[in-house]
Amino acid sequence: MGRAFQNRKESMAKTSDQNAKVYSKFSREIYVTAKQGGADPEANLALRGLLDRAKRAQVPAHVISKAIDKATSGAGEDFAIARYEGYAPGNVMVIVDCLTDNPNRTFGEVRQCFVKTKSKIGVEGSVMHMFDHSAIFVFASDDEEGALEALMMADVDVTDIEHEDGKITVFAPQTEYFKAKQALQEHFAGIEFEVDEIQFVPKVMAPISGDDVVMFEKFLEMADDQDDVQNVYHNAEY
């Protein structure tokens, strides 16, 4: 499972190297999370985790504070989650997560990503069953046994745990996110997570090559260009 997750992250990294886009996506997500759960990271654990991710992505402090201020002021748009599923080039299964204030516009923009790459947008649930909605933690340590014991003692339902190149990767159901994170923080003093996210992780991979790779990367680039698109999850391996 870890390798599949890493492949997806490496693929997405190719289309997420423009700072302005990264900042904009984080700003929107911070705004929505703070508006829904409150602007205090100590009380809103989802916001706390998101802010940690934003800092690791080197999102400037003023971008973060502006998004939080906007949420507390009551100004701004009302965003809602929109999720689309389908098959990208090479019969790759994809989930496109969006935050939108205009679902009709967002659907039209996402649909064009499928149409212009000769792909097929599906109905709700068409590929979701082939992904695990997982909490994922990656951190530097060689104490895999200690990590697993700490998680077990906290009654965390661990899906998978891997140790490779001095790093431990932990997978758990997304509903176990906060419990798992707290257990790891209590066991490993001063732990710094390289990855601390909830993601859709594919159960099986779809190897692609040749022209399919070119068209699939075009699909990712088009999706990344859409302001409403926050993440694209897929099972491509190449």
Image (spheres, grey):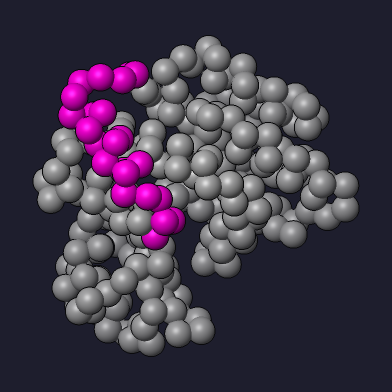
Of 105 and 122, nearer the camera is: 105
Give residue 158's quadrant in the image. Answer: bottom left
Q: Nearer the viewer, residue 233 or 27?
A: 27
Residue 6 lies within the magenta run: no
Q: Nearer the viewer, residue 231 or 146?
A: 231
> Would residue 61 be counted in the magenta stretch?
yes
Above or below, 171 against 34 in this view is below
Q: Position of residue 47 (x, y in %)?
A: 25, 45
Q: In this orientation, does residue 197 appear?
A: no
Boundaries of the magenta span: 56-78
- Residue pushed farthest front? 62
Left or right of 215? Residue 18 is: left
Q: Position of residue 75 (x, y in %)?
A: 25, 19
Please tell me whether the stretch drawn in magenta is mainly helix, strand or loop. Answer: helix
Q: Point out residue 142 in the picture as x, y percentages from the top left corner.
A: 38, 87
Point 40% across, 50% down: residue: 59
From this view, report whether residue 116 is shown above or below residue 192: above
Q: Quadrant of residue 23?
A: top left
At x 83%, y 55%, the residue is: 209
Residue at position x 52%, y 67% in the image: 2
Total numbered labels placed on residues in the image: 0
Q: Is residue 71 above or below residue 185?
A: above
Q: Position of residue 210 (x, y in %)?
A: 88, 53
Please tell me which residue is depicted at 39% across the width and 79% down the height of the picture: 140
Q: Residue furthest right?
A: 210
Left or right: residue 209 versus residue 204 is right
